[in-house]
């Protein structure tokens, strides 16, 4: 029987105007990314609704979104299967991330407003603090905040739509393999460098920092692949 222990509603406090579907999505996505619901587990819509404390309709809509992001597979009349983790898939995903994230980093540096630049600086410092405290879940939440802030500041709805399909898979992969790597502190360094370059309005530095971040993630992924062979 699947574990039906209620999952805590974690992450940033939902914005006042967040829909129930968005809140349900955040709760379920974090549960999958942090392996509270592990790869390969089969659950029902009702079990997920009971675990996260939202009604069936917002949970159903959230699961459809997670299916588009390839974190779950919905099997009619059989349930919901949490997608397996595939290292080769991660490497293909990074090929796409490299190009789009370089574009969005550069655009965010050019287009962010003053409030957003202050948020980038705050996130950089908080990520370093989370790394120093070995707070993996806290770091993942900040990573999500940084991803969303870059896309918001870049003001490119097409890039945002493409990246929405990629970040959850990447964050789950990192969470799964981070305990076998020594790169947690370095991860904070490269993420913070990106945030600070954008805050400074330096488009060239932001693009370079984005490439450095993807270089780090790709090396991390290839290390995971080598360890599994």
Image: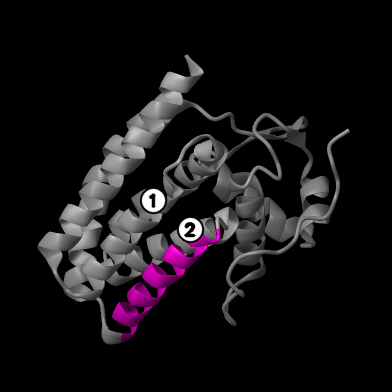
Tell me if I can see residue 144 in this picture.
no
Q: Is residue 220 above or below residue 18?
A: above
Quadrant of residue 134 within the rendered picture: bottom right
Q: Which residue is mark 2?
A: 131
Q: How is the image coloured?
A: one colour
First to last magenta residue range: 115-133
Q: Position of residue 47 (x, y in %)?
A: 82, 46
Q: Which residue is mark 1?
A: 187
Q: Secondary structure at mark 2?
A: helix
For the view shown, which residue lies furthest in the left direction? 204
For the view shown, which residue lies furthest in the top direction? 229
Residue in front for this viewpoint, 89 or 192: 192
Label 2: few (<14), some or many (≥20) within 10 Å? some
Residue at 55%, 39% in the rendered image: 179
Residue 76 among those drawn in magenta: no
Residue at 59%, 32% in the rendered image: 83
Quadrant of residue 114 within the rendered picture: bottom left
Residue in front for this viewpoint, 162 or 218: 218
Quadrant of residue 202 within the rendered picture: bottom left
Residue at 42%, 44% in the rendered image: 183
Cα gap from disc 2 to disc 1, whole angstroms: 8 Å
Q: Position of residue 110 (x, y in %)?
A: 16, 72
The rendered magenta stretch, by its main secondary structure, is classed as helix
On the picture, is 40 further left or further right than 146?
right
Q: Position of residue 176 (x, y in %)?
A: 56, 38
Look at the numbered discs 2 and 1 and tell me whether their residues touch, using CB distance below 8 Å.
yes
On the picture, is 31 further left or further right than 140?
right
For the view shown, which residue lies furthest in the right direction? 1
Q: Quadrant of the N terminus?
A: top right
Dot 2 or dot 1: first in sequence order is: 2
For the view shown, which residue lies furthest in the bottom direction? 114
């Amino acid at each position: 029987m699947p574990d039906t222990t209620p999952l805590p509603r974690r992450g940033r406090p939902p914005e006042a105007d967040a829909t129930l579907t968005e809140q349900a999505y955040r709760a379920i996505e974090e549960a999958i990314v942090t392996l509270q619901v592990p790869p390969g587990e089969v659950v029902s819509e009702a079990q997920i609704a009971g675990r996260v404390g939202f009604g069936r309709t917002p949970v159903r809509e959230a699961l459809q979104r997670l299916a588009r992001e390839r974190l779950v597979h919905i099997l009619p009349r059989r349930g919901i299967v949490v997608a397996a983790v595939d290292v080769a898939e991660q490497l293909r995903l990074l090929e796409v991330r490299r190009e789009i994230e370089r574009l969005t980093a550069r655009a965010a540096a050019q287009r962010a407003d003053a409030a957003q630049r202050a948020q980038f600086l705050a996130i950089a410092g908080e990520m370093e603090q989370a790394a120093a405290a070995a707070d993996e879940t806290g770091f993942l939440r900040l990573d999500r905040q940084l991803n969303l802030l870059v896309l918001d500041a870049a003001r490119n709805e097409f890039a945002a739509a493409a990246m929405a399909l990629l970040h959850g898979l990447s964050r789950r992969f990192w969470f799964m393999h981070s305990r076998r790597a020594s790169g947690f502190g370095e991860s904070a360094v490269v993420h913070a460098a990106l945030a600070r370059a954008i805050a400074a309005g330096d488009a060239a530095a932001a693009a370079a920092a984005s490439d450095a971040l993807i270089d780090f993630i790709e090396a991390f992924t290839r290390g995971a692949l080598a360890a599994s062979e």
